[in-house]
Structures are given as structure tokens and as C-alpha cells.
Amino acid sequence: IHSILEALDILNMGTSGAGAIGMADITFAEIDQVAAIGTADPVNYPAGYSPIIDHILSTPMIASVTDVRGGYDYGIPSTAYRNTYDLLHIEIIGLIDALKLIGDVAPAEEATTSLADITVNPQAFDGDMLLSLIALDSLIVYRMISTGISDANIDTTESHAVLGDDNYDPELPGVPEVFDIKIAEMTHIADSMNIMNITSVANIQASITLVALQALDAQDVTDLVEDDTEGPNTIIYYIIAETVDNDNTLFPDDNPNTYNPAFDDNYVMDGGVRVRLTREALASVL
């Protein structure tokens, strides 16, 4: 009860409004204060936060990133919930910090900027934004970044999160419209964008051209295709391989009559068929 009254006092609302707090009702200055209720009182709040405050905050926070497709809301991964309705406290804090970054909300603007003022467009994130968001280590933020990558149609089967990955969501639909992307892939994409001066996730595919690749030095090439480590990242590597040798004919078969796919070392092979240039061959070409 004390937590609710303290929150309503911060929000300058009457008790009748406690159940209908919307995105436009909360500024960042207010949400920081409300989310902090109970965090410094381990005696009365042994969990390190006020569960009822998190319940009140969860509704507007969920609404701020909702993304319904085919009847399923991809905005929040199932693993970010504390129960059926409420977000984990750490996810609430992570989402608050993420929205501040995305909206470029300066400290002086926190008292006048609300959740409703922030537009979330993951395809518009640049490399620095991706790195800053990844550093928050938030499941909701990982889903947000994954949405941008998935919607840009640059994800690969190998890049999808699987059981054992920190951001694996077991409750996604069988054939989801948004795939969760491995965190290592996100980081590699961000670093690659900065190397190639790509300003948005949406422009990655179009920006990786032969001209742009030929302007890189040897270390940049290695960082992009990871020929020194064999990955494990695939998205940027696959795009570059397709750009450089789309039909897998850059290296000749030598004599077709004596061609042995077992010794076709320049290509990743599948059943005797060339799939793409190996990382080493790709780096050597560039």
C-alpha cells in the first residue's frame, strides 16, 4: 500500500488512476523514481523491488514495444516475464535504459519526455546504437534488435538462437515471423557496420558492395569474414560471400573430367555441391 501511494504521489495521480497508467502518463524522470521504489529497502522488499509497482509499470512498458503479427506479440520474449502479466524487474530497468538510448533522451529532457514520445524502429539502428543496446544485457532489447535484423531479411538459419543461448525463447511460434538472433551475431553485425560506415540495419545488404569491400584493408577484411577464427558469425560472412561470388564460379573447376569435389578447398561443400567461398578463400580474394 505504501508503495502504491508513493508511486501515485510521484505521478501526481489519484488512487482511481493506479490501474490505468499509460505510456503518455509517465515521463522518464517519473519512471526512474517509481521503478526505484523498494530497491534500497531490503527489509521490507527482500526481492530488491516492489512487486506491485512492477505490476503497475509492466502494462505501459509492454505497450511501448508491442509488435503483434499473426496474432502473436513479438515485442516481449516469454523469458522476460516474471509471471503471466508482469515483467522481470531487471527487464523493466533494461527497457527504460534502452528507450532513453533510442530516443536520445538527455538528462535535462527526462522530466518532459514520456514513453509515448519514443519511436522504436530497430531497422534504423546504427552500429554504435546496437553496441550500446547489447551492453544492457536485456532479453527485451535482444528481441528488439533481432526484430530489426529479421525484418531486414539478412538473418541466416545458423544465426537463429537455439536452446542454450541466453536469448532463446521456447514459446515462439513454430515458424515465427521474427527469429531471435544469437547475441554474438548482433555484436559482429554492429562491429561490421562501424567498419563499413553503414548507418542502419536496413542498409546492410545494399551497402556491402564489391566497391566498398575492395576499399578495406586486410585487418578489416579479417574482422568482417573472420578467416582467422572460423566465425562463428554467419550473417555478414554470407552476405559478403554472395556479393563476391554469387554463382560460386570464381575459382575454376580445373579439368571438369577430373574434378573431385573432395579437393575443392576454396568452397564450403554440401554433397559435392559448392555452397559458398570458405572464409579463408574469401579473405584471400579481397
Image (tube, grey):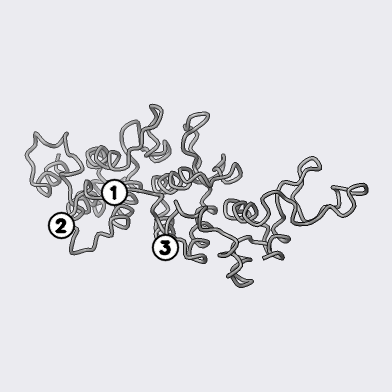
Where in the figure is residue 88, as x and y percent of width and height? 35, 42
At 35% from the left edge and 37% from the top edge, which residue is drawn? 67
Q: Is residue 258 left or right of residue 34?
A: right
Q: In this view, does 42 lie above or below 198?
A: above
Name the amino acid, label 3.
Asp
- Label 3, secondary structure: give it: helix
Name the residue carrying label 2.
111
Q: Which of marks 1 and 2 is in front?
A: 1
Where in the figure is residue 148, as x and y percent of width and height? 43, 47
Q: In this view, does 264 lie above or below 216?
A: above
Name the residue carrying label 1.
119
Q: Tag 2 or tag 3, which sits nearer the N-term?
A: 2
At 40% from the left edge and 46% from the top edge, which residue is drawn? 144
- 222 or 162, which is in the foreground? 222
Q: How far apart are marks 3 and 2 (CA)?
A: 26 Å
Q: Residues within 10 Å of mark 2 (few under 14, many from 20)?
A: some
Q: Residues within 10 Å of mark 1 (few under 14, many from 20)?
A: few
Where in the figure is residue 130, as x and y percent of width and height? 43, 57
At 57% from the left edge and 51% from the top edge, which residue is drawn? 235
Tag 1 near tag 2, CB within 8 Å: no
Where residue 93 is drawn, which disc sits there?
none
Name the residue carrying label 3.
128
Q: How far apart are marks 1 and 3 (CA)?
A: 18 Å
Q: Tag 2 or tag 1, which sits nearer the N-term?
A: 2
Name the amino acid, label 1.
Thr
- 265 or 165, which is in the foreground? 265
